[in-house]
Amino acid sequence: MALLNLHLKVWRQTGTQPGHFQDIEAPEIPDHASFLEMMDIVNERLIRAGQDPVAFDHDCREGICGMCSMTINGMAHGPERGTTTCQLHMRKFRTGDTIWVEPFRARAFPVVKDLMVDRSAFDRIMKAGGYVSVRTGAAPEANEIPIGKDVADAAMDAAACIGCGACVASCKNASAMLYVSAKVGQLNTLPQGHAEKDRRTLAMVRQMDAEGFGNCTNQYECEAACPKEISVRWIAKLNRDYAVASVKEVVGIGRQQAGDGD
Amino acid sequence: MKLDSKIPSGPMAEKWSRHKQDSKLINPKNKRKYSIIVVGSGLAGAAAAASLSELGYKVKCFCFQDSPRRAHSIAAQGGINAAKNYQNDGDSVHRLFYDTVKGGDFRAREANVHRLAEVSVNIIDQCVAQGVPFAREYGGGLANRSFGGAQVSRTFYARGQTGQQLLLGAYSALSKEIARGGVEMHTRTEMLDLVVADGETKGIITRNLVTGKVEAHAADTVLLCTGGYGNVFFLSTNAMGCNVTATWRAHRRGATFANPCYTQIHPTCIPVSGDYQSKLTLMSESLRNDGRVWVPKKAEDCGKPASQIPEADRDYFLERKYPSFGNLAPRDISSRAAKECCDDGRGVGPGGRGVYLDFSEAINEFGEKVIKERYGNLFDMYERITGESAYKQPMRIYPAVHYTMGGLWVDYNLMSNLSGLHVLGEANFSDHGANRLGASALMQGLADGYFVIPTTVANYLVTQKPGAVTTAHPAFKQALEDANGRINQLLGVKGKRTVDSFHRELGLLVWDKCGMGRSRAGLEEALRRIPEIRAEFWENVLVPGSGSLANPELEKAGRVADFMEFAELLCRDALDREESCGGHFREEHQFPDGEAKRDDENFCYVSAYEYSGDLSKPILHKEPLTFEEVHLTVRSYK
Amino acid sequence: MSSLLDSLSRFYASSIGKKLLVALSGLALIGFVLGHMIGNLLIFAGPDAINEYGHMLHTMGHGGLIWVARFGLLAAVLVHIVATIHLTRQNRAARKDAYGKEATRVATSASRIMIFSGLTILAFVIYHLLHFTVRVGNEYNNPALYTAMLDGQPVHNVYKMVIDGFSWAPASVFYIIAVALLCNHLSHGFASLFQTLGLATNKTWPLFQKAGHAFALLILVGNCSIPIAIWLFGYGR
Ligand SMILES: Cc1cc2nc3c(=O)[nH]c(=O)nc-3n(C[C@H](O)[C@H](O)[C@H](O)COP(=O)(O)OP(=O)(O)OC[C@H]3O[C@@H](n4cnc5c(N)ncnc54)[C@H](O)[C@@H]3O)c2cc1C
Ligand code: HEM
Ligand code: FES
């Protein structure tokens, strides 16, 4: 095990006040430590020196909860593909490196403190339609509707999203299309999600827009940053589903009765 | 105090349906008047909040993460059991019930487990309807895999992410109810205390983790769905935020804590590599299907690379000791065997705490490609963490704390002895006895949340006038003062040691003395040391910053302070239980060959502790366990 | 009716709605660019071919069709420009604080300068229209100088106009720069539009990408061959 001497440039910010970069020396970091463990060591030292430790979000530390969120050297979750910050290990760095550590930046993700950001916009998008409206107890027998393996696997590919927001952080336009497309795509792919397909698609995209995310310009930085390597083809599917739903809405297909009936 | 488990009468298979029949109903118009606090948004909490809101109750739900979707349930990999018998391999509700009781080493309550097995089938239906993408077969039907402790294939799974997929299902249901206005969601909000007004649980005290604001919330009943306390050991497979605070504070307000010493150690985790380490990572149990576990026969070989140790000098200890189950022996048994080897000085890797899990034979037999298909993700994860390739050299693994079977005591209605306090999921003690079988925690969390509490909560609510107690009640004022006082106390110590350093010290001690193997001498030492560490904590802890802003160190400090108190109860229970059962292994109580020796005559009961005001003198209440359906036998896996 | 307008305006207001319009208008413009290039290449078939082509364009449908095409194109261009400017502004706003350390992993440089390549193309198109369509600041509208005989009929001498136009170096240089940027624009835009229209799948995407690059190259080579031949190699002079 080797020890690394690192120079950190860490973003410090309190709430809505303007932030700044703080230069922090991080000597003797074990290369077996994870990035967050490196931050733990740095924080221990800061605390003992009477300084304010760096606040960051984390929980599971095994790459599944989606809580950790740092942009490291300009890359959301750092340089390793398919890896969250908590699973990034220091052996990917060299002694003497300067490492920039910043929050996920997006207008829709306001900074809470230092590297912690508010990603509740994602929850509000889900609230807009990220569900199948089935009541507890009202479900049919699980094997009643067969679902082909390809369909189930495809839905699972989309469902692998951990909602970390790296797609937004890495996108030049801070667009949330990869997240939204994965969420919409999972349910729109499955027969269980069909009844509410158009409604869900329109509502979730509208909420996404209302939150102030940017638009997709098909540059695919999101896919490169996604720790679960969700495919940008889900965005293509979302575009398609949205187009269909919009045309139906504009023309009024499927809603002939609305207004006179109920 | 009498602990009344309120188990319905009648034959085992009819208890739950009878109980549903007999449970009270509240008409829809009145349901709207009742408010319910749900603390936790994991499988248990999210499922409960969504289902209760659907019924019409006003629900307030809390979690400390930034989104309900990040509750620790998300980390479960393997799967969820259900007695669907889709494989036609002879599974049934009764068999699942039996396996779970036996797996729990006959220390669980039969009636609860039977109910769990019954509703397991509904859970799968519910999840599929929500759009949970379970693995499927080509024909379109659901796929199953087998798991430890069972001879049938009844585990449903979604790649290596079953927990995340089930939680996303529950979260979507919760989102739907939040959108409808039935649930008011409070994220980044931590419960600091429980409020008991005139003997009834009527609310909680919380701290907003962004603004630091400490607030009171009142409701007609409170549901704690706050998960397990594995982090008392500092290093565990649990998420960093998992805590005992919610249940411990409830305990201090009068709820009895049951079986705290029942903790589960998972045999296949990545070993500790240094003292900077913050958590341990689970490697799925499924690896043991193809991997062979061994250590060198001679201690002096431990420093050599594995490839230089000849076959004759390797000790495949699981195969040697348990010829019929071999590398697939149950969790508690495999864990202890690994520990014995390491205690014997034959452990491998840093600090000598590790054993090999070797795939070379499987790779030779099936080829690297097949092994990659089966375990590629896990091998990648292993390499990311250790920097070593398990295709080229054996994995190193070591047991780690994984799950806690103990929790707040509850009756059949999931209500604690404290009137109005309900406890669901890992936070309660109810279904797993002294050892939990793989894939049954997810089942329990969802069973409690979707199917049990929506029925049973009414039994309590009908006894209450809705909204009778508000935050104006003096009990709230008192609890607010207590919580603020504790925060100021933590900030006021201004000592020299960080919170983590205390947590690490406590954890190492508890792991050492009350981990895989427990002895009277060790436990007594722990019981001597814990109060000392606790005293030093309160004199020398250094919590930076203030209480009025986001302050992760302060959050940790509060949790560690509670672990400091809880650890004592954990060790005391372990000392008190003079037998070995499931995850609780007392070195004094073993057969000559090292197997656990249960004592049904003297210890066939649930230990439920009441807080006496003095941490060193908890009051023990015993709920005797009676077995109608299952015969008590010695668990043997030889 | 108003609910129809509501729906339409919501469609435009949405991010995907605007993107779909950009893609559709982009597709129309691609069609135009291709047709335009093929027509122009007739210059290598000699004066009669291109003059006849020019005459045909102006007389189709009694001279009406060209206006239909022009308005169609104008609409496409307007939609394309208005929507892309809107989108670009929204995108800038969405990342209001820049990273201290910027890094790009996969985004192509073409994709990152779409608005600049687009606006330069726009500037060129305006110049180009003034040059060859409205014909200001030159004598191309003077029948005495630019009339050719086709099947015994006098028609506008497109051939001579083009040769003369590109004989002037600055015009050729600007043209080449603009076409190069158009090529760049399309090297991202062509495949991108299939993603936007939801037609890209894991299987089809590599195809669209290759086709996009090939198309962009074709546009580059095809269009640039004209000024290069005239200006550098003296074709037709
Ligand atoms: C790595 C790993 C793998 C596992 N794999 C499996 C498996 O394959 N199959 C299986 O059946 N089980 C598995 N388990 C066990 C299972 O995941 C858990 O037991 C189960 O998910 C617990 O669910 P829960 O709802 O009770 O609690 P959790 O999911 O832990 O949720 C707790 C909730 O309470 C909230 N909370 C906690 N404290 C407070 C507080 N003080 N204030 C406010 N909110 C609070 C949290 O925010 C969270 O929302 C695994 C566990 C681990 C660690
Ligand atoms: C003949 C001229 C043009 C052609 C053939 C053309 C073609 C295209 C195509 C095919 C796209 C891709 C659409 C998509 O991603 O779905 C595109 C995108 C774009 N165009 Fe053009 N375009 C032309 C002119 C312009 C002009 C004049 C502008 C100036 C404003 C412009 C600005 C853009 C921008 C900014 C984008 C990116 C939009 C996005 O991805 O969000 N284009 N163009
Ligand atoms: S901390 Fe959970 S994904 Fe990184």
Image (tube, rainbow, N blue to C red):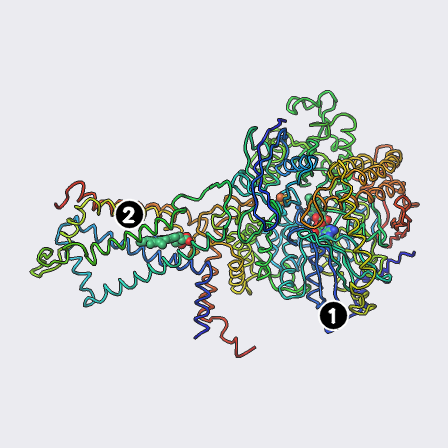
Q: Is residue B71 above or below residue B289?
A: below
Q: Secondary structure at mark 2?
A: helix
Residue at figure coordinates x 64%, y 41% from the top left = A54
Q: Please say whether residue A145 is visible from this viewpoint.
A: yes
Q: Judge the density around disc 2: few (<14), some (14-19), many (≥20) Cα neighbours within 10 Å.
A: many
Identity, as a three-letter code, of the amino acid under mark 1: Lys
Amino acid on which disc 2 is placed: Val
- The residue labelled by disc 1 is B31
Q: In which chain is the residue bearing label 2?
A: C
Residue B440 can be seen in this image: no
| Image quarter in which the C terminus of chain B is found | top right
Direction left: furthest residue: C152
Residue drawn at (75%, 68%), measured in percent from left and top?
A: B34
Chain designation of label 1: B
Front-most of residues A120 and B165 = A120
Quarter placement of the N terminus of chain B: bottom right
> Are circles 1 and 2 on residues that touch, CB within 8 Å?
no
Task: Answer with the quarter of the image where residue B85 lies.
Answer: bottom right
Q: Percent from the top left, x then y, of residue B366?
A: 59, 35
Relative side of B595 to C53, left or right: right
Q: What residue sits right under mark 2 in the picture?
A: C179
- Residue A80 image position (x, y, % from top left): 54, 38
| Left or right of A205, for residue B215 | right
Residue B379 got which mark?
none
